[in-house]
Amino acid sequence: MPDVSRSSAKTLLKHAHHVWDMTVPWVDMYWSIDLLKRFHAGGYTYVNLTIQDYPATYSGVVAEIKRFKALCAPHADWLCFAPTMAEIDKASADQKLAIGLNVQDTALIHDDVSAGLDVMLKAGVRHMLLAYQLRNRAADGCAEPGNAGLSLFGESLVREMNAVGMVVDLSHVGKRSTLDAMSISDRPVIFSHSGVKALCRHIRNIDDEQIKACAATGGVVGIVGIGAFLGDPAMQAETFFQNVDHIVQLVGPEHVGIGTDYIDDMPAVWPSMIAGQDTVWRDPYGTQLYEGVAFSPEQLLELVERMLQAGYSDAAIRGVLGENFYRIYRDEEIARHGGAQLFA
């Protein structure tokens, strides 16, 4: 193992232009400007927030976005909403934390798929989960024991998401539905926040077949940071690294990123998961833990140090830190605007 100093990791992180966390929950109980300050201080340049009502509705998502913008307004010196690549690039140049948005369901999309996706794109949402844990009209979630594939509506939804430039996100989705989506998608797909099932069998994690299929689309898997999903309630940086490294060894460093799903007050989460252990949070493998913490913004430097120790090149590390997800968003924006480059 190479002898790597903490200063080397700090230097690499400081000079990385794109350091992305692709999933951070942002519902009422988690709203915290102080948390976003921690991401900014930890070296992140971009955080993608899950911002929606439950169950998701058009009006609810738009209302939550309006509330979020009002909350951010007094902090414009270091924080900005950045739905386009040009705005993301400007935020990075200005050393601000850029914020993007996602919705973890497509249940709000009705028969007029194109119009529904257009509403979300115009609101600033850049990627959407096909399903969240349970079955919806499009797909099965990962908690559904039937493990059905995409419906006909789901197939049309994936194709329309490709057409309009909405990134298809397959975290929380059942295996067969993910494989169906990846087989018909002509654009890269992502798993914004998932763990490696080969390292911990859990319904929220994905297996090597899914990882390879994602890579074959040109896509990226963001490693989730909830320790209970990775079999490590302490959520050590080493555990996070092992999940990164599994994907690097399997399909290459260009197909992995960060999607921590970070929640500061994890003890507040466990009662609802325990209550749902026979339904939405079923535990068929007997591996579900109901304790522990999540991978924090302050642990990012330790992850960089560990990747350096493992002999990763600077380019590979920058990819994991954010350039891989940046590539997905950049290419979708180009496709959406017919090849026009709307970024620096």
Image (spheres, rainbow, N blue to C red):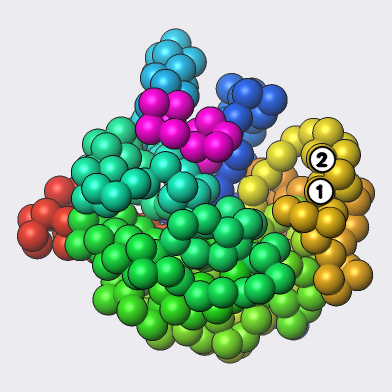
43, above or below 338, in the image: above
- In space, the residues marked 1 and 2 are separated at their CA atoms by 6 Å
Tell me the SS state at disc 2: helix
Q: Check contact, mark 1 vs mark 2: CB within 8 A.
A: yes
In terms of image quadrants, where is residue 118? top left
Tell me the SS state at disc 1: loop
- Residue 272: assigned label: 2
Tell me where residue 116 appears, x and y as whole percent: 28, 43
Q: Is residue 302 left or right of residue 104?
A: right
Residue drawn at point x = 39 percent, y = 52 percent: 127
In reply to whether residue 49 is colored magenta, the answer given is yes
The residue under label 1 is 276
Tell me where residue 195 appears, x and y as whole percent: 68, 68
In terms of image quadrants, where is residue 161? bottom left
Q: Is residue 182 left or right of residue 23?
A: left
Residue drawn at point x = 25 percent, y = 61 percent: 160
151, above or below 176, in the image: above
On the question of residue 58 being in view, the answer is yes
Q: Which residues are magenta?
A: 47-61
On the question of residue 87 being in view, the answer is no
